[in-house]
Image: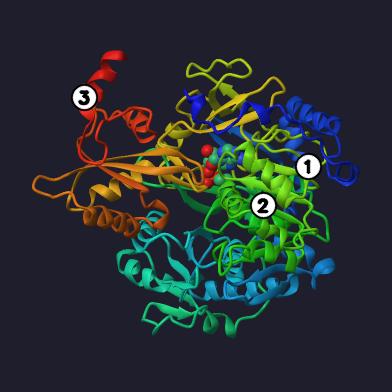
Amino acid sequence: MPDDSHALHSVLTEARIFPPPAEFAAKAHIRSMEDYRRLYAEAERNPEAYWGARAREELHWETPFRTVLEWKPPHSRWFIEGRTNLAYNCLDRHLEKRRDKVAILFEGEPGDVRRVTYGQLAADVNRLANGLKRLGVKKGDRVGIYLPMVPEAAVAMLACARIGAVHSVVFGGFSAEALRDRMNDAGAKVLLTADGGWRKGAVVPLKKNVDEAAPHIPTLERVVVLERVGQGGALGPRDVSWKALVEGESDVCAPEWVESEHPLFILYTSGSTGKPKGVLHTTGGYAVNVSLTTRWVFDLEEEDVYWCTADVGWVTGHSYVVYGPLMNGATTVLYEGAPVHPQPDRFWDMVARHRVSVFYTAPTAIRTFMRLGDALPRKHDLSSLRLLGTVGEPINPEAWMWYREVIGQGRCPIVDTWWQTETGAIMVSPLPGATPTKPGSATLPMPGIKVEVLDKAGHAVPAGKGGLLFIGRPWPSMLRTVWGDEERYARSYFGEIPGKYFTGDGARLDADGYLWVMGRVDDVVNVAGHRLGTAEVESALVSHPSVSEAAVVGRPDALKGTALVAFVTVKKGVEVTPQLEAQLCTHVTKEIGAIARPDVIRFAEALPKTRSGKIMRRLLRDVAAGKESTGDVTTLEDLNVLAALREAEE
Ligand code: WTA
């Protein structure tokens, strides 16, 4: 069960309620709690009729679906016999009315700005789609995408969707090793990359990483290289220049009308065990729910300049930088670089210059800005903002209040959106024109979404009490499987209680039915809004020749939400030195990426284990959080003594 004391909530602010601003309620998509409750009740009465109606409204179906849902737990199929194409829904649909509207407003870290209209984007996507076909990419083939946050990242995703290829985007911050593992698991045929990207004034060496990984990816036939930083070096025999690939291609490419259940993408995310899971999303159900939630939660209007700061390497980038806004014909901002570069007020400067009206970011970013002080945002004209969102980790009420007062100037509603890579779309969030908000709560489920907080036996826990967060019924944008591992899909998500999806989160519902997410209850941690498996970091550590055993746990951190603490035992004869600590950190960076670098490494003579040999992670979490004293913590700790004490107690 989750431990209440780990949550960052404070009882004082929890009591505060902010009603939706009147101007909002007057013209929002959902204008009142009555509207919300009516929709919610309608969906409860007949979920299939509800989702069928939404599906017809949200998408162009080239062939209409006949059956809304087939549910054979744990497998769901949605909008059966329907055929559609997601690139068509993001582009062609808008060309009549919005050909010259800016689809992507791009700003590079060096300050270069590009405005790509819907007309231009459609042409770029079609050219690349034709180019991919020329390279032999067919419907169902997997295409890797390892690009910086540039418009071509969206072009790449949409070109795959156009021809029915399955994309698998790998975050540019992941290392060559992490890229190799993901591409091998997906069986990628083609990989789209760039010579590099800009981050904190330096070049992220994407092509160099690809060159390291490619010889170890047997399925990989071609690598397409975009020129971004002008430092790519020579192209090898496997490589094709992006420019050369698209240059002679037609800007017309008929969309492949795929079945609703045709795979759209595989996105790797961390689970409890070592290997990341390839979360598979299919076309129709994903598109319907992403399109709908984008409009309802962000209340998009024609004139909005919408900026979600996530990278396309994460699910937030897939659903709410690329697909959701484009399906809605919006202007979506793409920013390449670091939030605080070259000045700590880069974000606010961009909000002011581009007149951003809807802004969506992670609590870690908000806490960072909060720490930098009010003067920075106050220097800029933030009057264009009308709605603020957060995602990725619990937001503490203090940060929520700061976001509201200093960034939103008390004027903008805040949508704290709870969802996951696996859910595809936002599941729990305020609707800005309807839902009164409470700082720190993601509030209420979207219509059609059945949120349940249960104990291990599957009984509902009373209001105010912590429990495990489940989704009690299938929804269109749920993951369909773990790529290549059906068994893991069934076990990870439906192994706790048959027929109910287990989220891995602990949560409680208050007396008003508002959801308070308390964080992960499995061995997944949210470090600065990035999802990591402690087991992944452990296997990276033990792959170092000096390390014998490692256990990695999360520790509450005021800035990052969770910090990573690694307990390490070294092999016989290895001397523990500060150099070794630094080496281990570098090693993890090389194996996974800088986001997985432990904040603290603590060397121990032995790891505390139960009599049956299981590492006592809860004890380690307590030690890491300083709740349990281990005497001289700077040197070798005899955790076994504590372990023996703990076992005697339990
Ligand atoms: C956490 C990101 C509290 C949660 C979209 C979940 C949140 C995990 C919130 C999924 C929120 C996400 N409040 N916690 N508003 N949003 N989380 O797959 O622990 O990268 O299980 O998807 O992030 O992370 P993922």
Q: Residue 428, can we see it? A: yes
Q: Under 8 Å from ligand 1: the CB of mark 1?
A: no
Q: Position of residue 402 (x, y in %)?
A: 67, 45
- Of the two numbered discs 2 and 3 in the rendering, the one whose residue sits closer to the viewer: 3
What's the mark number on residue 641? 3
Q: Under 8 Å from ligand 1: the CB of mark 3?
A: no
Residue with the mark numbered 2? 360
- Of the two numbered discs 1 and 3 in the rendering, the one whose residue sits closer to the viewer: 3
- The residue at 74%/65% (across/down) is 352
Distance from disc 1 to disc 3, alpha carbons, whole Å, reads 53 Å
Nearer-the-camera pick, 1 or 318: 1
- The residue at 68%/66% (across/down) is 349
Q: State the SS at label 1.
A: loop
Q: Position of residue 51 (x, y in %)?
A: 73, 38
Quadrant in which ligand 1 is drawn: top right
The picture quadrant where one finds residue 524 is top left
Nearer-the-camera pick, 421 or 527: 527
The picture quadrant where one finds residue 462 is top right
The picture quadrant where one finds residue 73 is top right
Taking 113 as reference, is 471 above or below it? Answer: above
Q: State the SS at label 2.
A: strand
Q: Amino acid at mark 2?
A: Tyr
What's the mark number on residue 432? 1
What's the mark number on residue 608? none
Distance from disc 2 to disc 1, alpha carbons, whole Å, reads 13 Å
Q: Position of residue 239 (x, y in %)?
A: 41, 78
Q: Amino acid at mark 1?
A: Pro
Q: Quadrant of the C terminus?
A: top left
